[in-house]
Image (spheres, helix red, strand yellow):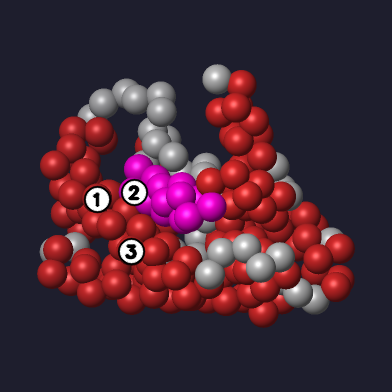
Amino acid sequence: MGEIKHWIDLLFHTDLQAFLKNLYDKYQSQSYIILMLIIFCETGLVVLPFLPGDSLLFAAGAVCSSMGVFNIPTLIGLLIVAAFFGDNSNYFIGRYIGPKIFNMKLRFINKEYLHRTHEFYEKHGGATIIIARFMPIIRTFAPFVAGIGTMSYGRFITFSIISSLLWINVCTWAGYALGSIPWVKTHFEMVTLLIIAVSLIPAAVGVLRGMMTKKTQ
């Protein structure tokens, strides 16, 4: 139990490089599977929107270039698979139990996120699956809401493939390109927090617009 708490503390600490380095040192090739599970759960389970996504991918790319940890083509390929299957699992969960959830009082699912994601769909249509990939929380709820009835599976799977390829490649290669820069290495925790802050901007803007719209009505 103590070891599990140790890994959880590391995972939610801003020093994700230390988490990934320790993970690889301890589990070697099995660490790829652990990262796949994190990405799968973050994109595939509406109860786990708080897991790291963008920042974890950036850190994974960074340790590939700065510490020689992980093989980046292998890592990217496996994480694309995890993101794709996470998306699709979430879609079918939404299709089969989503309508019931809207009528149930569940503490572990924030219905406000569901409603905001639905509004996001109303505005951006199918492109939501791609845009949402780069937005924490919305990324987790988007395929779930799509499964409820917003989008047919034939259309969803196309956007899911594109979004998985874009998200994993952009975030991981960005970390790989910048991770070996001395300033980034020295201030990596600050860079991680900046990535999180930037990725939250679209969601924050959406909330503010919603609040302003309600005031004008």
Q: How far apart are the two marked residues, 3 and 1, measured between alpha carbons?
A: 12 Å
Which residue is painted at 67% across and 64% down in the image? Answer: 63
Name the residue carrying label 3. Answer: 81
Residue 182, horizontal then vertical, whole percent = 85, 73
- Please state if 57 lies on the left or on the right of 109 as rendered: right
Q: Residue at x 78, y 60 (%)?
A: 188
Extreme-top residue of the structure: 1
Residue 176 rendering spot, x and y as whole percentages: 64, 74
Considering the numbered disc 1 on the image, is that residue within a helix, a strand or a loop? helix
The label shown at residue 44 is 2
* Mark 2 Cα shell of 10 Å, populated few (<14), some (14-19), many (≥20): many
Q: Quadrant of the N terminus?
A: top right
Amino acid type, label 1: Ser
Quadrant of res 111: top left
Mark-to-mark CA distance, 2 and 1: 6 Å
The residue positioned 60% from the left and 36% from the top of the image is: 7
Instruction: Please name the residue that numbered disc 1 is placed on.
Output: 89
Query: Hey, what amino acid is under mark 2?
Result: Gly
Residue in the foreground of this view, choosing between 96 and 30 = 30
Circle 3 Cα neighbour tier, 10 Å, few/some/many (<14 / 14–19 / ≥20): some
The residue segment tinted magenta is 28-45
Q: Are marks 2 and 1 in contact (CB under 8 Å)?
A: yes
